[in-house]
Image: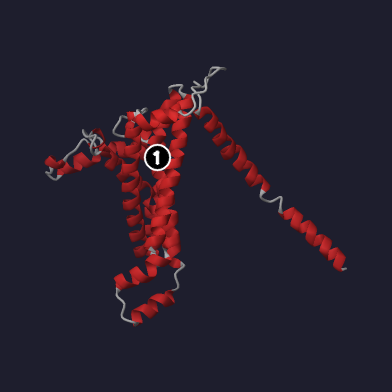
C-alpha cells in the first residue's frame, strides 16, 4: 500500500514539472529569442530587407551615446514625462485611494467613475484630448474665453516648452484610476486594529499615515511605481494620437523614436536603440525600488 502511494506521489511530482512549460515556451519564443535577435541585429547595419549586411560592432551604440541628438532629445522628453507622471499619478492615485478606501455606495460609484478612462483605448483618449488642447476651438481655450481669462490661453501641445507637461496630464488622467485600485487593495489589507491602537495612543492623521499606512502600503506603491514607469516609456499610441506620425521634436519619446528608425529601414540601428531603451527602463525601475525600500 505504501509503495503504491509512493509511486502515485512520484508521478504527481513529475506531472507538476509540466505546468510551467507553456509559460516558459511563450517566454522563450516571444521575449528571449527576439531579444537575442535584437542583440545580433544591433551589431550590424541591416536595413531589414537586404540579404546581406555588414557587422559594425559597437558603432551603433557609440553613435547613440555620442552623436545622436534626436535620440538624446527623445530620451530627455521621456525622462521628463516619466518623472512628472510618476510623481503626479502616484500622489493622485494614493490620495483618491485614501478617500475612497471605505466601501460605501458613493465611494463605489466614484471608484467606477475614476476607473472609467482606463477601459478606453489610447487612440480614443488621444483624439478626445486633442480636441481639449486645440488652441482655436478646444475645450480649455473656449472655457478660458468664456470666463474672460483670455490671457491664460495657450497653444498647449504646440508649445515646445510645455508639450510634455500636457502629455503628462493626459497620461495621468488616463491611468490614475487604475493605480487607485491597486492602492485601495493595499490599504484594505492593513489591519484596522493598528489604526485603532494608534488613535488610542493619541496619534494624529499624519502620524498614522507616516508610521502605519506608508510602510504597509509600500508593496502596492512598488507596483504602482514600476507600472507607471513602464507606461510612461510605452506611451506610443498616445503620443502618435496627440502629436501625429511621426510626432514633432517636443513630443518625441523613445518608443516613437525607435519606431521611426525602424520605419526608415535602419533595422540594425533601431535594434541598438531598443536595447538602450530596455536598459534605461530596467535601471530606472531598479533605482525606484531601492529608493522605496529606503523610504519605507
Q: How many marks?
A: 1
- Residue occupying the point 50% across, 27% down: 43
Q: Tell me the quarter of the picture where residue 155 sits.
A: top left
Residue 160 screen position, x and y as percent: 24, 34
Measured as percent of width and height from the top left, residue 191 is found at: 45, 73
**Quadrant placement of the N terminus:** bottom right
Front residue of 166/37: it is 37
**Residue 154 position (above or below residue 15):** above
Residue at the (41%, 56%) spot, across then down: 290
Q: Quadrant of residue 264?
A: top left
Color encoding of the figure? secondary structure
Residue 181 in view (yes/no): no
The structure residue drawn at horizontal position 38% and vertical position 70%, both measured from the top left corner, is: 212
* Residue 163 found in image quarter: top left
Residue 164 visible within the image = yes
| Residue annotated with mark 1 | 235
* 181 vs 261, nearest the viewer: 261
User: Considering the numbered disc 1 on the image, is that residue within a helix, a strand or a loop?
Assistant: loop
Circle 1: is it few (<14), some (14-19), or many (20+) Cα within 10 Å?
some
Q: Examine the rendered structure and indicate whether residue 292 appears above or below residue 123.
A: below
Residue beneath the point at 83% across and 60% down: 7
Q: Which percent across, then down, holds residue 238?
A: 38, 38
State the image coordinates of residue 72 (x, y, percent, origin top left).
34, 33
Q: Is residue 235 left or right of residue 36?
A: left
Quadrant in which the C terminus is drawn: bottom left
Amino acid at each position: 500500500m505504501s509503495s503504491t502511494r509512493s509511486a502515485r506521489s512520484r508521478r504527481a511530482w513529475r506531472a507538476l514539472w509540466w505546468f510551467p512549460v507553456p509559460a516558459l515556451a511563450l517566454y522563450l519564443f516571444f521575449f528571449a529569442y527576439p531579444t537575442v535577435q535584437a542583440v545580433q541585429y544591433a551589431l550590424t547595419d541591416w536595413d531589414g530587407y537586404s540579404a546581406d549586411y555588414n557587422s559594425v560592432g559597437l558603432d551603433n551604440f557609440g553613435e547613440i551615446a555620442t552623436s545622436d541628438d534626436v535620440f538624446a532629445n527623445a530620451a530627455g522628453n521621456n525622462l521628463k514625462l516619466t518623472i512628472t507622471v510618476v510623481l503626479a499619478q502616484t500622489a493622485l492615485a494614493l490620495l483618491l485611494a485614501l478617500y475612497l478606501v471605505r466601501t460605501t455606495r458613493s465611494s463605489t460609484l466614484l471608484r467606477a467613475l475614476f476607473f472609467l478612462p482606463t477601459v478606453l483605448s489610447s487612440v480614443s483618449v488621444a483624439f478626445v484630448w486633442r480636441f481639449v488642447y486645440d488652441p482655436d476651438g478646444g475645450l480649455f481655450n473656449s472655457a478660458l474665453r468664456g470666463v474672460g481669462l483670455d490671457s491664460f490661453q495657450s497653444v498647449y501641445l504646440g508649445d515646445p516648452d510645455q508639450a510634455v507637461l500636457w502629455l503628462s496630464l493626459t497620461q495621468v488622467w488616463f491611468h490614475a484610476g487604475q493605480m487607485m485600485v491597486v492602492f485601495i487593495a493595499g490599504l484594505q489589507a492593513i489591519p484596522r486594529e493598528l489604526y485603532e491602537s494608534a488613535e488610542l495612543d493619541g496619534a494624529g492623521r499624519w502620524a498614522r499615515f507616516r508610521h502605519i499606512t506608508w510602510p504597509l502600503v509600500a508593496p502596492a506603491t512598488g507596483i504602482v511605481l514600476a507600472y507607471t514607469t513602464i507606461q510612461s516609456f510605452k506611451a506610443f499610441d498616445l503620443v502618435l494620437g496627440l502629436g501625429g506620425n511621426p510626432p514633432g521634436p517636443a513630443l518625441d519619446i523613445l518608443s516613437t523614436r525607435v519606431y521611426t528608425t525602424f520605419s526608415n529601414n535602419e533595422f540594425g540601428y533601431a535594434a541598438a536603440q531598443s536595447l538602450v531603451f530596455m536598459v534605461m527602463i530596467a535601471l530606472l525601475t531598479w533605482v525606484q525600488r531601492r529608493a522605496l525600500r529606503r523610504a519605507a
